Image: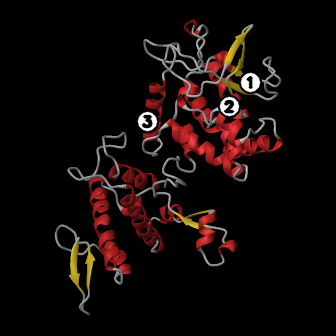
Amino acid sequence: MQEVRRGDGRRSCTIVWPEGAVHDEADRYLRRYDGEPGTQRTYAFLLVDHLRWLQREELAFEAVTLRDLERYMGIVGAVVLMPLGEPWRLGKRPYGRNTLSTAASCLKAFYVGLAADGRNVELGRQLDATRLPSKADRNRALLGHVKTAMPANPLAPRRNSRRHPKMLPDGARDRLLEVVTTARDRMVVTWLYDGGFRIGELCGLHVADLHLRERAECAEARSAHVHICHRDGNPNSARVKSKYPWELVDGIVRGGLIRRASPAMIHTYFEYVTNEYPPAAGGHGMLLVQLAGEGHGQPWSPDGARAMFRRAGVRAELGRVKPHQMRHNFASAVLDASGGNVMIARDAGGWSSAATVDEIYGHADIHDPQFDAALRKVWAAES
């Protein structure tokens, strides 16, 4: 990259070949930003990196494909060695998320410009994509209600839109389900999102605690539900925070904190049990078990679940993911679906002791039509 002084006294940036000749394509592209010196300088530095990479890969502009550009974006953002190859810019820090977004904009405009000149037209067509406008797009734009499409960039990194720092970004559920590798892990993601469980509650469940059919023998809830029972002796040291009284009568669990089960929860449970759950499960009867290694079939600990989410968060590009974040998402979703009814949200997720709910907040019946409609609305939106 070289700074030059134009005839009218203005300074601008261009790119020259090693022998000193001006790089025609890059210079023509950067001249578009003569009136924006900051943008021009930034794009010049980003374009230099890309041109050096093309030279190393021995790729001409006409031969570059969308897959090549995706590979390049992965390499400049790589922190460690990846299947795509060694990190580009050796000895320098990889691009951060904001720089990757800027590089994506720079490369899209550069190759769309080349396509307008009749070079690599197919790549220009693939980059000149559109998407449906979001609610935020419509709110920002004049006459946004008539917009039918917005420009999109297939090279841009996915953005994590959070409503609150403690919550996972919008769309995180689908991204986690894409990267987890077992039916057990898919079940855990689904149950945390649809049930609002604490991780200790989920890892502390026994198979007997699950009444996943209509009108179960416990006669305490007509719909599919789960009994969350406090046990001190769980072999995986999982503990339930709320100590609701419960009992086991003739092999049937009664009492505890009752939590409704969504259709997606039931589906993922049967997928896990039929495909991965060991036949004997070591005689402990717990729901979540280890699926590999020396501890195969033994109860899965909350620490093991947290480690799974840390790995999945990295693969899904969500950063560090904690199970409790899904509980915050659940609470927010129920509040939205119920029109801000705090009692429904508290009882849906068990946020208070029985005494607090009964004496101060009142108690929302889990068979109440509004309670039922709120949960079904959440489950339908998440599925």
Colour setup of the view: secondary structure
Q: Say which element carries label 3.
A: helix
Quadrant location of residue 330?
top right
Q: Say which element carries label 2.
A: helix
Q: Earlier in the sequence, mark 2 or mark 1?
A: 1
Q: Say which element carries label 1.
A: loop
Q: Tell me the tag on residue 310.
A: 3
Q: What type is the residue that disc 3 sits on?
A: Arg
- Distance from Cα at disc 3 to Cα at disc 1: 29 Å
Looking at the picture, does residue 357 appear above or below residue 32?
above
Tell me whether circle 2 and circle 3 mark residues in contact (CB < 8 Å): no
Tell me whether circle 2 and circle 1 mark residues in contact (CB < 8 Å): yes
**Residue 133 in sight:** no
What x and y, as percent, mark residue 303? 44, 26
Q: What type is the residue that disc 2 sits on?
A: Met
Residue under pointer 1 = 212
Looking at the picture, does residue 61 appear above or below residue 158?
below
Residue at horizontal 52 percent and vertical 30 percent from the top: 181
- Distance from Cα at disc 2 to Cα at disc 3: 22 Å
What x and y, as percent, mark residue 295? 45, 13
Q: Tell me the tag on residue 265.
A: 2
Quadrant in the picture for the N terminus: bottom left
Q: What type is the residue that disc 1 sits on?
A: Leu
